[in-house]
Amino acid sequence: MSIVSFIIDSFFLGVGLAMDAFSVSLANGLKEPNMGGKKRFKIAGVFAGFQFLMPMIGWVCVHTIIEVFSSVQRYIPWIALALLLFIGVKMIFEGIRTWGRSDVPDTSLSHGLLIIQGIATSIDALSVGFTIASYLMVSALICAAIIGVVTFLISMAGLFLGRKLGMRLAGKASVLGGIILVAIGVKIVIG
């Protein structure tokens, strides 16, 4: 495989894997339209970090404990669904509870929920470790880094778009964001 095709393949792998992170970023931006730049950077960084880490964990599993990992692999979509349902339903209920109120409580994204989102949006990237199992470690690291960078940029775009839409949708944004997360979870299970 040439260097150019390796980079192109890694880029498109990153784009495909980053779509869940984009959607969740969009939901986060909808939920918190006044989010500052530092927090947007943190959210995109967490998503990118998990998208980098998960393929490497998968790669290590292939080279060490493939028997254990392959028995767990069929549950990965269900784990992602459970995490996204938890977050999405919570957002929907918060949005319904505060619908039309002017004294909306602070519902900004906590560190714990951000980590759960990071895991949920990148858990499918674990199986990419199988795809890149034939790569040497350096190539696997470069591929995972490209995936991480692509995810960061796409997540930032989702946060930006979500903020813009969130300012227009005001109180309805949390409900919409929750529905998006639930839909992502269902899509992951359906395939």
Image: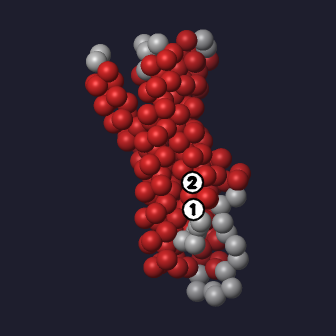
* Mark 2–mark 1 CB contact (< 8 Å): yes
Q: Which amino acid does the dot numbered 1 rest on?
A: Gly
Q: Quadrant of the C terminus?
A: top left
Q: Is residue 49 visible?
A: yes
Kindly report the distance in space between the C-alpha atoms of the residues bearing marks 2 and 1. 6 Å
Residue wearing tag 1: 37
Residue in the picture at 47% in, 52% down: 155
Residue wearing tag 2: 41
Q: Could you tell whether 68 is left or right of 27 in the image? A: right
Q: Is residue 188 visible?
A: no
Residue 124, image x and y in percent?
Answer: 49, 36
User: Which of these two is toward me, 76 or 160?
Assistant: 160
Residue 141, image x and y in percent?
Answer: 50, 24
* As drawn, 185 above or below 180: above
Secondary structure state at the residue bearing disc 2: helix
Q: Could you tell whether 110 is left or right of 81 in the image? A: right
Query: For residue 93, which quarter of the picture?
Result: bottom right
Q: Which amino acid does the dot numbered 2 rest on?
A: Phe
User: Which of these two is toward me, 127 or 144?
Assistant: 144
Count of residue discs: 2
